[in-house]
Amino acid sequence: MKMMRVEEIESLPRPGLESIQLKRLQRLVARVYERVKPYRAKMDAAGVKPDDIQTLSDLSKLPFTTKDDLRDNYPFGLFTVPMEEVVRVHASSGTTGKPTVVGYTAADISTWADVMGRCLAMGGVTRHDMLHNAYGYGLFTGGLGAHYGAERVGATVIPVSGGNTKRQITIMRDFGSTVLLSTPSYALNLADAMEDLGVTLDDLKLRVGIHGAEPWSVNMREEVERKLGIRALDIYGLSEVIGPGVAMECPESERGMHILEDHFLPEIVDPETFEPLPPGQPGELVFTTLTKEAFPIIRYRTKDLSTLYAEQCRCGRTLVRMEKVTGRTDDMLIIRGVNVFPSQVEHVLMGVEGVEPHYQIEVNREGNLDTMKVLVEVSDTVFHDEVKVLEGLSKKIQVEIKDLLGVTCSVKLVEPRTIQRSEGKAQRVIDNRKM
Amino acid sequence: MRVEQIAVFLENKSGRLAEITSVLAEKNINIRALSVADTADFGILRLIVDKVDEAKKVLKENGCTVGKTNVIAVEVPDRAGGLASVLKTIEAVGLNVEYMYAFVNKSGENAVLIFRFDDMDKAIAALTKDNFTILSGDQVCAL
């Protein structure tokens, strides 16, 4: 019965859906204005009151929320409920040393399970499936978010998390996993490891893969599908909005992922003027949460570049679709599913005595794995005539980057002024991956 | 008793050593001894030159990372066992050699061993006690 209800909401005629959205938006704005000082201050500064939201297009009167707002109110300053009502927090990397923290009430956890469950159902997952969840469990929203959604659908969840690839393959084969949830690069990693272990597609029961948390190309999708013998579908989410479960590609969609619009209100804005753009035009993706309690967010600028499509999908859903994310408006990198900002690397370097912030990040894809190399210029202060001292310095930088970002990188010491400075400003990132 | 040595950071790329030596040549700076320590990623060029401060200045002007360290130059007869006898003295007092290199002087009679120890004072004391000839910077350049 429940599934019937879900399908109904996903194929509601637009006016019906939009009236639900408007009611939820009005309630949200009123609550946030009343309870969260930083939101109230920004709305007052913009001269907008909750009562000004009379139609959905009034949304554009509200100020944007950015990652800077999250940082300024670190860790819990934008929560709308007292901490005793918060049952869980997650965190993702911020632009500097401080992470971005998000919180959930019990009802939020249930909403999250609902939306993630609907995404899985959209991908054809049912209670008959054995679901191999290889997203990392922990502060990252991927693992636990997918987990609760899979349980909501009633699938059997294998909470295998990341790492230990050989064991994952043994489990997939012996347990008869039918659904794989992982980053696309990890899916390819599993495929390669299968070959090494002599496991063939005949040994597996996999039929569908749901992949997100990092950008992947159409070619990469074809490779995943061919090597694992599955249908590979795209999923989108971000912790600031809820985590995984914001948008999902249905098997019939020929362009992009359905956004669960009854919970998340999308906009596309011009990345320079920030004016809202109509469907079909590419720009920066902006989200407003409609149903979250502990950490709702208004007009969050994701810095992800995408396009919205309003035409109804062949599957019958009326939910708007978003194009696979085509890029970023900032310098954020995604390395093996982890968000990395060059400023975080700089933060680490500044903390190492004597190291000057002349650095460059080189990203490559070796096989299926992203690798990050940090080039650091050796100043007179840190230079030493003994090899072991300089190697110790590289090691120290590597360990501290791993500690802060959770990403293993290699460090290469380079001569001063070898890092190109264009117009007095260094080019911080060389990304050699082909997306 | 100590000799000033210049150390230059080298990235592993072709032509770097040639550039550095030509910069020194243009200023008429003579290299008396040198060694290169290399790892997979970088190298350290160590030089003993006749005009230390000038060399440091000109290399810095050319964008190099330059350091100045003290090393010890020990002169031994150029025959079998010369180095071994020095190392025996060093080992006896429990010192470590951080790095070393050597060259033979023009006459061919003596070899000059350049050392960096973890404790330089202790090394000088031990070598002096065992009657080794320790050269000054001027002496090394005059050879």
Image (cartoon, rainbow, N blue to C red):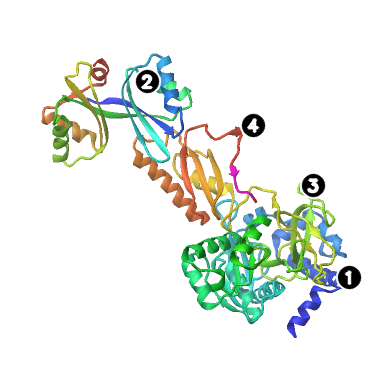
Q: Chain of mark 4?
A: A
Most foreground residue, A323 or A285: A323
Marks 2/3 in contact by CB < 8 Å: the verdict is: no
Up/down of A273 relative to B119, above or below: below
Most foreground residue, A353 or A284: A284
CA separation in Å, label 4 and label 2: 33 Å
Q: Chain of mark 1?
A: A
Q: Which mark is residue B53?
A: 2
- Left or right of residue A116, residue A186 in this image: left
The residue where tag 3 is placed is: A273
**Disc 2 versus disc 1: nearer the observer:** 1
The residue where tag 1 is placed is: A15
- Check disc 3: other Cα within 10 Å, few if <14, some if 14-19, many if 20+: few
Marks 1/4 in contact by CB < 8 Å: the verdict is: no
Residue type marked 3: Thr
Marks 3/4 in contact by CB < 8 Å: the verdict is: no
Q: Earlier in the sequence, mark 1 or mark 3?
A: 1
Disc 2 is placed on an element classified as helix
The residue where tag 4 is placed is: A423
Most foreground residue, A356 or A406: A406
Q: Earlier in the sequence, mark 3 or mark 4?
A: 3
Most foreground residue, A68 or A257: A257
Asked if both marks, 2 and 3, belong to the same chain, the answer given is no
Residue stretch rendered in magenta on the structure: A429-434
Disc 1 is placed on an element classified as helix
Q: Quadrant of residue A12?
A: bottom right
CA separation in Å, label 3 and label 4: 25 Å
CA separation in Å, label 1 and label 4: 52 Å
Residue type marked 2: Asp
